[in-house]
Image (cartoon, rainbow, N blue to C red):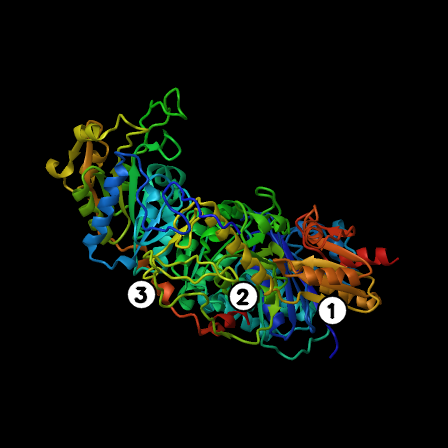
Amino acid sequence: MNQQKPTPDRYGRSSTGLKYPKTPTWCPGCGNYGIWGAIKLGIKGTGYPPEKFVLVYDVGCSSNMADFNHHYGFHALHGRALPAAAGIKLANHDLKVLVVIGDGGCYGEGGTHFLNLMRGNHDITVLVHNNHRYSLTTGQMSPTTDKGTKTKSTPEGSIDEPLNPISLSLSNHATFIARQFAGDIPKLASRITEALNHSGFALIDILQPCPVFNPNQSYEWYRENMVDLETEGHAQNDKLNVWKQAMRKDKIPIGLFWKEEKAAYHQQIAQLDSSPLATQAIDNIDISPLASEFK
Amino acid sequence: MEKQSLNWKVAGFAGEGIMTTGILFSKTCARHGLYIFDYTEYPSLIRGGHNTYQVYADTNPVHSQRKKVDILIALNKNSLSFHQDELTQNSLVIYDQEDDKVNIKEFALPCKSFNLPMVKLAKVAGAERVMGNNVALGASIFLLGLNLEILNQVISDIFSKKGNQVVSLNQQAAKAGYEFAKIHSQPILTAVNNKPHNYLTLTGNESIGLGAVAGGVKLYTAYPMTPSSSILHYLAAKAKKSNIVVKHAEDEIGAINMALGSSFTGARSMVGTSGGGLCYMTEAFGLSGIAEIPLVVVDAMRPGPALGMPTWTAQGDLQFVLTASQDEFPRIVMAPGDVFEAFDLTRRALELAEKYQTIVILLTDKYLSESRHTLKLDNESFNNQRIGFSNNPKPDESGFFPRYQDSENGVSSRSVPGSLGGTYIANSYEHDNYGFATEVADIRNSQVEKRARKLTAMAAEIPEQFYIKENNAALTFISFGSTKGPLLATKHLLKDAGININILNLSWMWPFPKDQVTKVIKESSKPVVIEGNQQGQLARLITQETGIIINDKLNRYDGRPFYPEDIASYVRKIVK
């Protein structure tokens, strides 16, 4: 075997010099720093034991956060964080499940999971780090990129209209829908706590500046263009009003758009009433009640 | 006891209740103490195509369908012309001249026919048109010397949920057929006299479902795809009773990633699909491999590529499942050969997936998945031990649990979320002992080598493969999965003609049972590889693993299963 001292990788890690969790690898000014801080505060805000959280990460700059936290983690395949999260909750509903995902993974690659798992009201909190770009792959257009935007994959300007996650989830049975800004850690943190305490599918679309691949939508630009739903006298129980806010073009509304109390997916399965699947004993299984119908 | 068998077939338009009629007859035979093999053919549509159900029943154990029928119930004109090569001079064709305006002479049948006014008799009995099938059942019972009371009991068991009226009408229709046959015909077989047994008769997919429950499955996820869907249907119907959760997911990708999430928490998890769905799932195979998450995947094969022929059979996914995924990782691939192996290997697959923290693929096919067969279970209660969990996980100086620490056999101790001190990351990226992503060359190498080491331990689990050897055998058939049944039936056919054959049927495809296969080939005068694909995938695998090239091959890829009669004539040609 090689007796040389192993060289550390670009994160300063080596097989002999381990140091955890890691220091973030995001670019200076990245919106992920703020979201990261808000996640830690938001989790703390629930008062729930740290080991009972699972953070499910998709793939992208946001999801490289897997290496920077001290919680059970599941670093999923690209676009597949949502079904993995739903499976975790279904198998052990004593856990709180938080998904860290980007606009590409959630609204693009994993779009079908997003559409369908919200309908089931799976009790997971989905934080979409929405920077309107595929930044880890160096800045191609994403499902939320404005029409006409020039990116590496759309040098003539993108032709597709941007996806509106708020109106989409409003019309498709999500029970907690919010949009927050990565640059306001306390507000985002308390929203994350609220979402984690909500029983059902909670979406927080987070406006995340990417100074490298999307410099136009900067912190300043967002601050100028955002409007807080709280200052607008937003009526959450009036779906038509929520719809109007969701469809606004003049400003970007942030805050809690919609919240509804409904039984979560796992709460509607009788087999889960007594205890989570993962803790149910399998050491004494009698199949004779099932076998009799084949006689 | 005298050996006695019967081969009964009903054919008609899809949507005419052929399946129910077949099951009623099959259950009646089983309750006479007979061993059963039911084979069905149907098109990929809901109404109108040609649909058949055939029951082969015998006083001795049976292994496959047979070609030549004793009774054919032809519910329409197509059924009179499509099955002529299955008739002998001793066969009897039952048809309804009045209902389908049949001129029986046009069909030039090689055997006797019996005009049974099924629809009319059903209506006279006060029943609906579709209950004409029961008239045919009643007549079959008389003509085969069976007991009408047993049929009545089966009708009652199957239809009791629909109320007494439905039960009674079905029974009256059956009685009308029985009485009509008694007046106008005579039995073609003498009364069956077998000791009633207490065995089960079920499809391969039901057996997989039952085996999954026995093996402690807690979550089953799937997206419907023929011929795997009946596992989903069976487990969904039994979920409440057996305290499991079944999720019809948004697609196959959702299904497998959901199952991996579930398995990560410690719940035994399983998915099922067919070739097309399996293609969607392959990315997640790699996730199971690298994050070392146990998972059982059922692939019920049908002819491909792409959509192929949905309701027919094939063994063409073998080479695909051996390596499907990015890069390499150790996996187990099994191919049950009959309903017993379907039950037993599913249970075992759940255990081995947990033990080796990887994917176990169960390869079945439409023929095994949807044929009904007698299953003798010695035991109906199962004690599943949990394997590889750290009950009291402790973090090391890093503050994290070394979930992927190297070990002699490559398997490391697992913690599950919720347990204090067990924090780690299940990572789809290459990772270190704690699951943190890494690109450091020596960590990468040690994790690759750790995972690969599991393969050696897995190979030690391979049981002795099914092998029947005789002196002076004309040849040795080497097969896998469901071909076992037709080969066993062939053996019986040839025995009567004084020809012996050897059979080596593989149910463990990977790690490959190379020692036994090598030994069998070396001691065989003439090995022949028989399989349900065109390219000879098993033959290629044998060459890859043993270095031996076998030139004699018997391949079938038209969607139909092997018939013992066809294999027997292949052997006769060679023996000449």
- Do residues under tags 3 and 1 come within 8 Å of each other at their CB atoms? no
Real-space CA distance between mark 3 and mark 1, rounded to the nearest whole angstrom:
57 Å
**Residue type at tag 3:** Asp
- Residue A138: horizontal and vertical position, in percent? 38, 31
> Of the residues shown, which amino acid type is indicated by label 1?
Ile
Q: Secondary structure at mark 1?
A: loop
Identify the residue at the far top of this view.
A156
Q: Is residue B204 above or below residue B306?
A: below
Classed neighbour count for the residue bearing mark 3: other residues with Cα under 10 Å, few (<14), some (14–19), many (≥20)? few
Q: Quadrant of residue A253?
A: top left
Q: Estimate the spatial distance between the alpha carbons at disc 1 and disc 2, rounded to whole Å.
A: 45 Å
Q: Which mark is residue B188?
A: 1
> Residue extending furthest right?
B576
Give coordinates of residue B459: x percent, y percent.
60, 61
Name the residue that disc number 3 marks: A273
Q: In the rendered view, would you say B557 is above or below B90?
A: above
Residue carrying label 2? B348
Q: Are marks 1 and 2 in contact (CB under 8 Å)?
A: no
In the rendering, at what x and y percent does residue B435 appear?
40, 52
**Helix, strand or loop status at disc 2:** helix
Chain under callout 1: B
Asked if residue B153 is positioned above or below residue B568 in the image, the reply reads: below
**10 Å neighbourhood of mark 2: few (<14), some, or many (≥20)?**
some
Q: Describe residue B203's horizontal placement relative to residue B488 as left or right.
A: left
Q: Which chain does tag 2 point to?
A: B
From the viewer's perspective, is the residue at label 2 or at label 3 nearer? Answer: 2
Residue B18 percent location from the top left of the image: 58, 57
Q: Residue at x 30, y 44 (%)?
A: A23
